Amino acid sequence: MPMGVVSDDDFATELTRSESKSSPREVAKPSTPSGQVIDINRGRGMGNVGVPESLQKVIGDTVITDGRQEAVELAKNFGISPSSVSAYSAGATSTASYDEKNAELTNNLDKSRQRVIGRARSKMMQALRYITPDKLESSKARDLAGIAKDMSAVIRNMEPEPGAKEPATNGPTFIIMAPQFRDERSYDIIQAKDEF
Protein backbone atom coordinates (compact mmCIF):
# COMPACT_ATOMS: atom_id res chain seq x y z
CA MET A 1 0.00 0.00 0.00
CA PRO A 2 1.43 3.43 -0.88
CA MET A 3 2.24 6.04 1.81
CA GLY A 4 -0.31 8.72 2.34
CA VAL A 5 -3.21 9.89 4.41
CA VAL A 6 -5.73 7.14 5.03
CA SER A 7 -8.92 6.87 6.98
CA ASP A 8 -9.01 5.30 10.44
CA ASP A 9 -10.86 2.25 9.07
CA ASP A 10 -8.25 1.63 6.36
CA PHE A 11 -5.47 2.04 8.89
CA ALA A 12 -7.07 -0.48 11.29
CA THR A 13 -7.61 -2.98 8.46
CA GLU A 14 -3.98 -2.76 7.33
CA LEU A 15 -2.74 -2.97 10.91
CA THR A 16 -4.81 -6.11 11.48
CA ARG A 17 -3.57 -7.64 8.25
CA SER A 18 0.11 -6.96 9.03
CA GLU A 19 -0.11 -8.30 12.59
CA SER A 20 -2.16 -11.35 11.69
CA LYS A 21 0.71 -12.60 9.54
CA SER A 22 3.26 -12.19 12.35
CA SER A 23 1.15 -13.07 15.38
CA PRO A 24 -2.16 -14.80 15.82
CA ARG A 25 -3.49 -12.35 18.44
CA GLU A 26 -6.40 -10.09 17.61
CA VAL A 27 -5.81 -6.37 17.21
CA ALA A 28 -8.37 -4.02 18.60
CA LYS A 29 -9.67 -1.26 16.37
CA PRO A 30 -8.14 2.06 17.50
CA SER A 31 -10.60 4.39 19.11
CA THR A 32 -11.19 7.85 17.76
CA PRO A 33 -9.27 10.32 19.84
CA SER A 34 -11.35 12.81 21.72
CA GLY A 35 -10.04 16.14 22.87
CA GLN A 36 -10.79 19.74 23.39
CA VAL A 37 -9.34 22.67 21.47
CA ILE A 38 -8.25 25.46 23.80
CA ASP A 39 -7.28 28.84 22.42
CA ILE A 40 -4.02 30.14 23.87
CA ASN A 41 -4.11 33.89 24.30
CA ARG A 42 -0.71 35.15 23.23
CA GLY A 43 0.33 38.38 21.65
CA ARG A 44 -1.84 41.45 21.51
CA GLY A 45 -5.17 39.63 21.61
CA MET A 46 -8.20 40.24 19.49
CA GLY A 47 -8.84 43.91 18.79
CA ASN A 48 -5.75 45.18 20.66
CA VAL A 49 -3.76 47.47 18.38
CA GLY A 50 -1.13 48.53 20.94
CA VAL A 51 2.53 48.21 19.95
CA PRO A 52 4.42 45.74 22.17
CA GLU A 53 6.84 47.36 24.60
CA SER A 54 9.77 45.41 23.18
CA LEU A 55 9.14 46.93 19.73
CA GLN A 56 8.78 50.39 21.29
CA LYS A 57 12.21 49.92 22.88
CA VAL A 58 13.79 48.79 19.61
CA ILE A 59 12.37 51.78 17.73
CA GLY A 60 13.50 54.22 20.45
CA ASP A 61 16.97 52.64 20.46
CA THR A 62 17.14 52.95 16.66
CA VAL A 63 16.36 56.68 16.86
CA ILE A 64 19.34 57.20 19.17
CA THR A 65 21.86 54.90 17.49
CA ASP A 66 20.95 55.14 13.79
CA GLY A 67 18.86 58.30 13.53
CA ARG A 68 15.20 59.18 13.13
CA GLN A 69 15.00 58.28 9.43
CA GLU A 70 16.11 54.69 10.08
CA ALA A 71 13.64 54.40 12.95
CA VAL A 72 10.79 55.70 10.79
CA GLU A 73 11.67 53.12 8.10
CA LEU A 74 11.69 50.36 10.73
CA ALA A 75 8.37 51.50 12.16
CA LYS A 76 6.87 51.71 8.67
CA ASN A 77 7.53 47.97 8.24
CA PHE A 78 5.31 47.32 11.27
CA GLY A 79 2.62 49.85 10.31
CA ILE A 80 3.62 52.33 13.02
CA SER A 81 3.29 56.07 12.36
CA PRO A 82 6.20 58.57 12.47
CA SER A 83 4.45 60.41 15.31
CA SER A 84 4.61 57.22 17.40
CA VAL A 85 8.34 57.01 16.63
CA SER A 86 8.71 60.51 18.10
CA ALA A 87 6.80 59.43 21.20
CA TYR A 88 8.98 56.32 21.68
CA SER A 89 12.17 58.35 21.28
CA ALA A 90 10.93 60.73 24.00
CA GLY A 91 10.16 57.88 26.44
CA ALA A 92 6.38 57.95 25.96
CA THR A 93 4.30 54.95 24.91
CA SER A 94 1.96 56.90 22.63
CA THR A 95 1.34 60.33 21.22
CA ALA A 96 -1.63 60.73 23.58
CA SER A 97 0.62 60.22 26.62
CA TYR A 98 3.58 62.23 25.30
CA ASP A 99 4.02 64.12 28.57
CA GLU A 100 3.89 60.94 30.66
CA LYS A 101 7.19 59.04 30.56
CA ASN A 102 7.30 55.25 30.72
CA ALA A 103 10.03 54.20 33.17
CA GLU A 104 11.15 51.09 31.28
CA LEU A 105 11.22 52.87 27.93
CA THR A 106 13.11 55.83 29.42
CA ASN A 107 15.67 53.50 31.06
CA ASN A 108 16.19 51.72 27.74
CA LEU A 109 16.75 55.07 25.98
CA ASP A 110 19.24 56.10 28.67
CA LYS A 111 21.16 52.83 28.18
CA SER A 112 21.28 53.48 24.43
CA ARG A 113 22.61 57.00 25.00
CA GLN A 114 25.25 55.65 27.38
CA ARG A 115 26.41 53.17 24.72
CA VAL A 116 26.79 55.99 22.19
CA ILE A 117 28.57 58.16 24.77
CA GLY A 118 30.94 55.30 25.63
CA ARG A 119 31.90 54.77 21.99
CA ALA A 120 32.39 58.51 21.41
CA ARG A 121 34.48 58.82 24.57
CA SER A 122 36.62 55.88 23.45
CA LYS A 123 37.25 57.46 20.03
CA MET A 124 38.00 60.81 21.64
CA MET A 125 40.57 59.23 23.95
CA GLN A 126 42.18 57.39 21.03
CA ALA A 127 42.45 60.66 19.11
CA LEU A 128 43.93 62.42 22.13
CA ARG A 129 46.49 59.61 22.61
CA TYR A 130 47.72 60.13 19.07
CA ILE A 131 48.42 63.82 19.66
CA THR A 132 52.10 63.52 20.48
CA PRO A 133 54.76 66.22 20.63
CA ASP A 134 55.98 65.03 17.24
CA LYS A 135 52.55 65.38 15.69
CA LEU A 136 51.96 68.76 17.24
CA GLU A 137 54.70 70.06 14.96
CA SER A 138 52.99 68.68 11.86
CA SER A 139 49.55 69.50 10.44
CA LYS A 140 48.08 66.13 11.41
CA ALA A 141 47.54 67.21 14.99
CA ARG A 142 44.88 69.67 13.85
CA ASP A 143 42.95 66.80 12.32
CA LEU A 144 43.26 64.77 15.51
CA ALA A 145 42.15 67.74 17.60
CA GLY A 146 39.15 68.13 15.30
CA ILE A 147 38.20 64.50 15.90
CA ALA A 148 38.57 64.96 19.65
CA LYS A 149 36.44 68.12 19.51
CA ASP A 150 33.74 66.35 17.48
CA MET A 151 33.64 63.41 19.89
CA SER A 152 33.33 65.76 22.87
CA ALA A 153 30.43 67.48 21.11
CA VAL A 154 28.74 64.08 20.72
CA ILE A 155 29.20 63.42 24.43
CA ARG A 156 27.92 66.89 25.37
CA ASN A 157 24.83 66.44 23.20
CA MET A 158 24.05 63.00 24.57
CA GLU A 159 24.67 63.54 28.27
CA PRO A 160 22.11 65.46 30.28
CA GLU A 161 23.53 68.46 32.10
CA PRO A 162 24.18 67.72 35.78
CA GLY A 163 21.24 68.81 37.89
CA ALA A 164 19.28 69.95 34.86
CA LYS A 165 15.61 69.21 34.57
CA GLU A 166 14.08 67.94 31.39
CA PRO A 167 13.40 70.74 28.96
CA ALA A 168 9.87 72.06 28.97
CA THR A 169 9.72 72.29 25.16
CA ASN A 170 7.40 69.38 24.58
CA GLY A 171 4.79 71.54 22.89
CA PRO A 172 5.03 74.08 20.11
CA THR A 173 7.07 77.22 20.63
CA PHE A 174 5.57 80.55 19.59
CA ILE A 175 7.76 83.56 18.89
CA ILE A 176 5.88 86.82 18.59
CA MET A 177 7.70 89.66 16.88
CA ALA A 178 6.57 93.18 17.70
CA PRO A 179 7.61 95.83 15.17
CA GLN A 180 9.45 98.82 16.55
CA PHE A 181 7.48 102.03 16.65
CA ARG A 182 9.03 104.76 14.52
CA ASP A 183 8.12 108.43 14.62
CA GLU A 184 7.40 110.41 11.41
CA ARG A 185 10.51 112.45 11.99
CA SER A 186 12.72 109.39 11.43
CA TYR A 187 11.64 109.13 7.78
CA ASP A 188 13.17 111.19 4.93
CA ILE A 189 10.93 113.86 3.43
CA ILE A 190 10.68 114.07 -0.36
CA GLN A 191 9.02 117.07 -1.93
CA ALA A 192 6.83 116.20 -4.89
CA LYS A 193 5.59 118.65 -7.54
CA ASP A 194 2.03 118.35 -8.71
CA GLU A 195 1.79 119.13 -12.40
CA PHE A 196 -1.32 118.79 -14.51
Image (spheres, grey):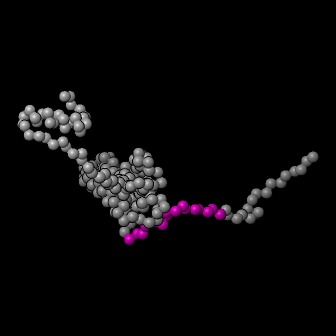
Residue 90 position in % (x across, y down):
42, 60
Question: What residue is drawn where x is 45% and y is 59%?
Answer: 94
Between 102 and 111, the one lying in front of the other is 102
Asked whether 167 falls inside the magenta stretch, the response is yes
On screen, 93 above or below 75?
A: below
Residue 121 position in % (x across, y down):
29, 56
**Which residue ends up furthest to the top in the rendered image?**
2
> From which residue to which does the magenta span run?
163-178
Q: Say left or right for 143 vs 93.
A: left
Question: What residue is drawn where x is 24% and y is 47%?
Answer: 33
Q: Is residue 59 visible?
A: yes
Between 153 and 22, the one lying in front of the other is 22
Q: Quadrant of residue 118?
A: bottom left
**Which residue ends up furthest to the right in the rendered image?**
196
Instruction: Specify the quadrant that holds the N terminus.
Output: top left
Question: What residue is drawn where x is 19% and y is 38%?
Answer: 12
Q: Quadrant of residue 154?
A: bottom left
**Which residue ends up furthest to the bottom in the rendered image?**
163
Q: Is residue 60 visible?
A: no
Between 133 and 114, the one lying in front of the other is 114
The mark total stands at 0
Question: What residue is drawn where x is 37% and y is 62%?
Answer: 106
Residue 43 position in % (x across, y down):
35, 54
For the stretch drawn in magenta, the main secondary structure is loop
Q: Say left or right for 102 vs 15.
A: right
Q: Say left or right for 131 vs 80.
A: left
Residue 32 position in % (x across, y down):
24, 45
Asked whether 184 falls inside the magenta stretch, the response is no
